[in-house]
Image (cartoon, rainbow, N blue to C red):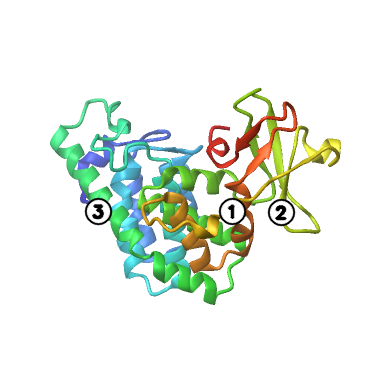
Amino acid sequence: MLDLSSPVWQQLHGPFGSAEAVPGLLQQLQKDYTAEIKDELYWEHLFHQDTIYSSTYASLPYLSELARQSNDPEVKLDIYVTCGIFVANQQTVNSGQLPAEFAHQNPPLAEELVRGIYTAYLIAVEHLGELSEEIFRYAEAAQKDDQEKRYILAADAAYRGDRVVAGILLTYSEGDEYMVGCPSCYEEMYIWPNENSLGMTAYSDDPVFNGKENGQAVTPSALGSVSSEDSPLARLWQAAHAIKNGQLMEQLPYLTGKVNCPACGEALDIWPELLPL
C-alpha cells in the first residue's frame, strides 16, 4: 500500500483538491480512534457528498488493517460499515478496469502506480469481507437494532460485489418506505409496510400527505425457497437470517414480490425497479 510518507498523497485528489492532509489523519486514527478525527477523515476527505476520490482508494488498506488489528469491536464495526459505504459507491470493483477517479490526476500518475494502489485496495476489500461473520456475531450479541444491521448487510453485500443489493439497502436504510417506478406507465408508487399486519401495500400518492386509501396489496414471493449461492438475492436472504434482521426478513418476500400498479393496473416485479429511483 502507498506509504504514508510518500509525496504521491499530495497528488491524489480529495473533495477540496490535494489529499495531503489524509496521511496525518490516518496516523492520528491509528493512535486514537476518536469521533472527531474519523468524521473529518471519512466525511470531509474520503467520502464527501456521496463521492469517493483517488485518496479513498489509497486510504482503504490502512482502514482495513486498523479494523483487523483493533481489539475494540465497536471500532471494527464502524470501519467495516464505513468502508462498506465507500465500496458500494465504487463503480469499477472487479471490473478489470482502473478506477475513473484516477483519470483526472494532474499531473497524471503512472499507470503502474495507480495499479499498485488499486491492487492494495482490492486486497483490503477482500480482507474486510472476511470480517463479516465476526461482525454478524457481534451485532447480534450487542443487540444492534435492525437499521444498524441493515448497514452491516449493505457493507457485506458491497464486499461480495453485490453492489445493487448494497445500493438498495443504503437507499432505503430505514425500511419504512420504498419508491418504485412502474415500467408500463412510468408513474411512481410508494410501498409501505402495513402498520398492524404482515405485508406491504403500494400507493400511487405519498401516504404521508394523501392517506392510505386505494392501496394495492403486494403479493409476496416464495423467497425462502431461493437456494442458489450464486444469486445476490439468495445471499442477502441468507445473510439477513444469519444476522437476525427481523425487519428485513419480514419485508424481503414482499420486496421481491409482485404488485399491480395503483396508477395503471399493470402487474410488475418490485425488486428490479427499486434501485433506478
**Quadrant of res 251:** bottom right
Which label number is shown at residue 123?
Answer: 3
Which residue is nearer to you in this view: 196 or 243?
196
Which residue is nearer to you in this view: 176 or 199?
199
- The residue drawn where x is 17% and y is 44% is 116
What secondary structure is found at the residue carrying circle 1?
A: helix
Q: CA distance from mark 3 to mark 2?
A: 41 Å
Q: Earlier in the sequence, mark 1 or mark 2?
A: 2
Give the residue pinned by disc 2.
199
Mark 3 is on which residue type?
A: Ile
Which residue is nearer to you in this view: 85 or 186?
186
Mark 1 is on which residue type?
A: Leu
Query: Dividing the image into 4 quarters, which one contains the C terminus?
Result: top right
Residue 208 at x, y percent in the picture: 81, 41
Which label number is shown at residue 150?
Answer: none
Give the residue pinned by disc 1.
252
What secondary structure is found at the residue carrying circle 2?
A: loop
Residue 38 at x, y percent in the picture: 45, 55
In the figure, 102 relative to 125: above or below?
A: above
Mark 2 is on which residue type?
A: Gly
Q: Earlier in the sequence, mark 3 or mark 1?
A: 3
